[in-house]
Image (spheres, helix red, strand yellow):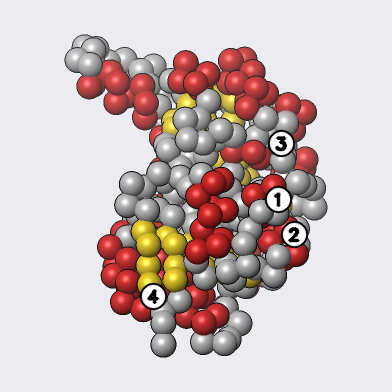
Amino acid sequence: MNKPRIWITRKLSDATLRRAQRDYDVVVNLKDQPGTKEQIISASFEFDAIIPCHSEIFSSDVVSKFGPKLKIIANHSVGVDHCDLGALKKKNILVTNTPDVLSDATAEIAMLLMLGAARHAICGDEIVRTGNWNNWSPSFMVGKQLTGSRLGIIGMGRVGQAFAKKARGFDMDIHYFNRTKLNKNISNGAKYHETIESLLEVSDFLSLHCPSTPETNLLLNEQRINLMPSGSILVNTARGSLIDEKALINAISSGHISGVGLDCYKDEPGGNPEFSKYKNIFMLPHIGSATVKTRDAMGFRALDNLDSYFAGKNPADLL
């Protein structure tokens, strides 16, 4: 019996590729460049399944040109804003993602960004690295302390909960907004806010952990940013589309926001060149899940979904 034919659009972890090549007829994009529209359309005629990353765009215009062979897209990501789910459903193509397995890694990056933004990591590193650390004073590199501060979290799903757990280790006062209020045994004392606006008003630190949807596009606009306490810190490890970047730059320039930690941007790759002008914006290139343990787990989760499908079962992470 012929093995199902799979296209893996990027160079995934070695353990993932070994398992995939053992069980399937696999073609891997070893050049590790995002799949183009033409390549994605062509693949729909050649492969039974695709394992893409968020770098491959399955828009309605692309999906409308799909051939009949492709049956399932097993995303190597939690977010699926790169997939037009409605268009794929019309083509009877199943879509899965990889929840659960990257929560801790992403929460760790959020902690790194929050600490770095609060304690002037960019400026401090530059001063030492360039040999310009030649004095000290009590007013030198004074930052914002996490301990005892109020932390607002928008989106208290898996990543948001993992981040809150880590923030409690810094004795932060946790507040959150979520589509639904969490049970007390899950919220662990975090204070629920019925509106984003009331949360922002008490957020000395704010961290975004919600998906990119039409409803969350530009969630943090100028009006809402202005509700945050003066001198607050903003962290985003979710999706760049959540923030009005122009409004954020204005808030940084005025000093209303004293520091920002970003792992995602409206335009990726590349980010926003304007952000580079500000030493109080601590930036990373969308690496929230980039640990060996997590990347292996994501790849295995995608393969688990394919295994279930080709065994005639419903994949666990079917959307």
**CA neighbours of label 2 inside 10 A, class few (<14), some (14 to 19), many (20+):** few
Element on which disc 1 rests: helix
> Which of the two discs, 4 and 2, sits closer to the camera?
4
SS at badge 4: loop
Residue at mark 4 to residue at mark 1: CA–CA distance: 28 Å
Report which residue position mark 1 lands on. 60
Measure the C-alpha gap from mark 4 to mark 2.
28 Å
Residue at image point 75% right, 59% down: 86
> Do callouts 1 and 2 mark residues in contact (Cβ within 8 Å)?
yes
Q: Residue at x 73, y 31 (%)?
A: 221
Give the CA distance from mark 4 to mark 3: 41 Å
The quadrant of the picture occupied by the N terminus is: bottom left
Q: Nearer the viewer, residue 135 or 70?
A: 70
Q: Which residue is mark 4?
A: 24
297 above or below 304? above
Image coordinates for residue 82, horizontal then vertical, percent: 61, 50
Q: Amino acid at mark 4?
A: Tyr
Residue 156 spot, x, y in % from top left: 63, 58
Residue 303 position, x and y percent, is 44, 73
- Residue count near mark 3 (Cα–Cα under 10 Å), binned few <14, some 14–19, many ≥20: some
Residue 220 on image: x %, y %: 70, 36
User: Relative to 2, is 69 on the left or the right?
Assistant: right
**Where, quadrant-wise, is the C terminus in this rendering?**
bottom right
**Residues at badges 1 and 3 in contact (C-beta under 8 Å)?**
no
Amino acid beneath label 1: Ser
Which mark's residue is nearer the viewer, 3 or 2? 2
Q: Which residue is mark 3?
A: 218
Kind of element beneath mark 3: loop
